Image (cartoon, rainbow, N blue to C red):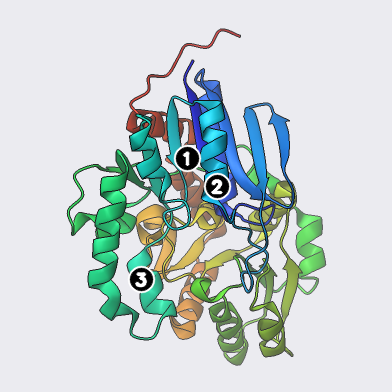
């Protein structure tokens, strides 16, 4: 049995895609006969046993202005725990605050991979004035990251572009998966739909963190555009974050309901399946798990063409420029199509992303063989 330790910061009950991806990978490793331990931040030191492995939470303060994310302030605490655990493989889901774990692992002859969950070059371009001028510095930083780990894993070709141009010979591409059982067209809830849209108007949904890099204000402006065109519409925004109050002010008078972060995955699954269209506004999404969950739910999606999502959704969704008018045009096109075939295409596309295949791909990146598990 191989012990794999996953490490990350920014993992909280509201951390969405990262927490979900780590959990599904852990479940996949355990199903293939391996032991899994996670080291993540928490409000206090504690250990939790789960059906798939063990979670060590280390006390970490909330990062100011982050909307509740926690960061372990002393990486030495992580390495101390790693020394005590003596794992066979290390998997780091944090290219920034825990990047030093690669060098530590190399000194201790511990094979280590780093999983890249964002495009640092495009994130800088979006959030930092003159961010594109930082590309040379970012390339140098990425080169150091790649040489610090045995393997760099990216989940899409789009995400891999900033390492392709280095180039990084230890780069691997392994797509993530989606929960095809929890998210399913059978979750369509007509009572919920009637509650959210009692007048029978088209129902739009987005499930996104309300923070600047996700560009959630595009959803508000898309609804405003659709209303101006006279389209009967209702919109539900599931998510929370630092932009929520600003978005609620901007949405005043529009048919938009903010329901906050949905910690109940079943509730989220029913919402996604009951929608007519799901909007994924993020311009720098490296994979877009929420969009894939919508497809698994049988609901077409409209995404930003500049992100990795066109690569993920294929012909099961609409990829458009990141303008509210373009999103509105796509919504109208989706609503004008027969519902049955669109829902079928969405589900069929999602079925090509299976977590078992993802776990096997990550084990291959770890150079670990699956074990036969006798139950």
Q: Secondary structure at mark 1?
A: loop
On screen, 65 above or below 285?
A: below
Query: Is 23 left, or right, of 252 in this rendering?
Result: left
Q: Which mark is residue 122?
A: 3
Q: Residue at x 44, y 78 (%)?
A: 127
Position of 323 compared to 195: left or right? Answer: left
Badge nearest the viewer, 3 or 2? 3
Q: Report, in whole angstroms, how far the alpha carbon at label 1 lies from the one at label 3.
A: 29 Å
Q: Which residue is mark 1?
A: 351
Residue 229: x and y in percent read 57, 89
Query: Which residue is at the front of the view, 331 or 61?
Result: 61
How would you rate the neighbour count of disc 2 (Cα within 10 Å): few for under 14, some for 14-19, many for 20 or more?
A: many
| Residue 245 percent across, percent down from the top left | 71, 82
Does residue 189 appear in this view? yes
Q: Residue shown at 29%/67% (left/top)?
A: 138
Cα distance, mark 3 to mark 2?
Answer: 28 Å
Local crowd at mark 1 within 10 Å, few (<14), some, or many (≥20)?
A: some
Q: Is residue 184 visible?
A: no
**Distance (Cα) linking label 1 and label 2:** 7 Å
Label 3 crowd bin: few (<14), some (14–19), many (20+), radius 10 Å: some
- Whether label 1 touches label 2, CB < 8 Å: yes
Q: Please tell me which of labels 1 and 3 falls first in the chain.
A: 3
- Secondary structure under the numbered disc 3 in the rendered image: helix
Name the mark on residue 296: 2
């Amino acid at each position: 049995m191989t012990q794999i330790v996953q490490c990350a910061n920014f993992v909280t009950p509201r951390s969405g895609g990262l927490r979900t991806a780590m959990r599904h990978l852990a479940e996949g490793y355990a199903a293939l006969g391996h032991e899994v331990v996670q080291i993540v931040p928490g409000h206090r030191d504690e250990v939790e046993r789960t059906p798939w492995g063990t979670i060590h939470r280390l006390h970490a303060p909330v990062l100011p202005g982050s909307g509740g994310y926690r960061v372990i302030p002393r990486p030495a605490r992580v390495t101390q725990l790693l020394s005590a655990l003596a794992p066979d493989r290390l998997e780091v889901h944090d290219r920034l605050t825990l990047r030093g774990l690669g060098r530590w692992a190399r000194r201790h002859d511990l094979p280590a991979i780093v999983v890249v969950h964002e495009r640092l070059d495009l994130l800088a371009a979006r959030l930092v004035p003159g961010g594109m001028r930082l590309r040379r510095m970012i390339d140098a930083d990425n080169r150091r990251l790649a040489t610090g780990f045995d393997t760099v894993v990216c989940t899409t070709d789009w995400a891999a572009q900033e390492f392709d141009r280095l180039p990084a010979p230890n780069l691997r591409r392994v797509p993530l998966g989606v929960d095809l059982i929890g998210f399913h067209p059978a979750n369509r809830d007509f009572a919920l739909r009637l509650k959210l849209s009692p007048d029978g108007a088209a129902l739009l949904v987005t499930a996104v963190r309300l923070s600047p890099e996700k560009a959630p204000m595009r959803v508000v402006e898309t609804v405003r555009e659709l209303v101006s065109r006279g389209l009967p519409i209702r919109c539900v925004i599931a998510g929370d974050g630092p932009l929520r109050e600003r978005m609620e002010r901007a949405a005043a008078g529009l048919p938009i309901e903010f329901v906050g972060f949905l910690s109940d995955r079943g509730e989220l699954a029913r919402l996604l399946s009951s929608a007519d269209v799901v909007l994924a506004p993020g311009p720098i999404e490296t994979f877009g798990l929420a969009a894939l969950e919508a497809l698994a739910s049988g609901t077409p999606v409209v995404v930003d063409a500049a992100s990795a999502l066109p690569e993920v959704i294929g012909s099961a969704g609409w990829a458009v420029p990141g303008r509210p008018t373009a999103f509105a045009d796509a919504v109208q096109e989706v609503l004008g199509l027969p519902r049955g075939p669109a829902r079928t295409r969405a589900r069929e596309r999602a079925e090509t992303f299976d977590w078992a295949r993802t776990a096997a791909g990550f084990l291959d990146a770890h150079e670990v063989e699956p074990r036969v598990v006798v139950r």
